[in-house]
Amino acid sequence: MKELLLALSVWASAATGLPMKPPPDVVFMDSESLNAIVFEDRAAPLGMQATAFYKDGRIVLPSDWRADDIASVSTLVHELVHWLQDGIERPGTCRGDSERQAYEAQFTFLRAAGLDPYATSNISPIHLFLLTACMEDHR
């Protein structure tokens, strides 16, 4: 896992232009607990399921995550982008901007593997729009 994490960190840094840093810690958690944390014990919006998250220097992946599954690996790429974003001053950005950058990297990764990113990640264009919209007045 250490080698994969390093390789994907280098790839994510190159794909986003974000500076490289030592790979984060990765832990695994059952999907029910993962969803409870991400959605703060509320119903998931639009029936979505959390597939991973990054917080406080740690990436949390579901216990059924597999390094030999490109969809699972693309989720790790997405979270690595959030890890690279952490601690970087980005004036005028909102959460949607951070999500957009992470999804762009994830979708680029999936397309490079010859896969349809929407089908592989189970996210529709409408979901993507909502997840990447800047609805707060931060600009």
Image (tube, rainbow, N blue to C red):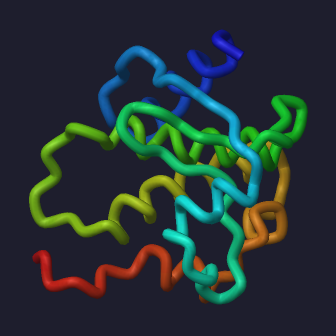
Q: Position of residue 92 (x, y in %)?
A: 12, 66
Count of labels shown?
Answer: 0
* Residue at image point 56% right, 72% down: 41
Q: Is residue 93 left or right of residue 25?
A: left
Q: Is residue 77 left or right of residue 117?
A: left
- Work out which quarter of the rendered image holds the N terminus and state it: top right
* Residue at image point 55% right, 28% down: 11
Q: Residue furthest right?
A: 68
Q: Position of residue 76 (x, y in %)?
A: 63, 40
The relative height of residue 129 versus residue 96 in the rendered view (above or below) is below
* Residue at image point 39% right, 32% down: 57
Q: Position of residue 93 (x, y in %)?
A: 20, 64
Q: Which of the pair 139/60 is nearer the observer?
A: 60
Q: Is residue 138 left or right of residue 133?
A: left
Q: Residue furthest top?
A: 3
Q: Which of the pair 92/79 is nearer the observer?
A: 79
Q: Position of residue 134 (x, y in %)?
A: 30, 80
- Work out which quarter of the rendered image holds the C terminus and state it: bottom left
Quarter where residue 66 is shown:
top right
Q: Is residue 19 left or right of residue 28?
A: left
* Residue at image point 21% right, 38% down: 87
The relative height of residue 65 versus residue 122 in the rendered view (above or below) is above
The relative height of residue 65 versus residue 22 in the rendered view (above or below) is below
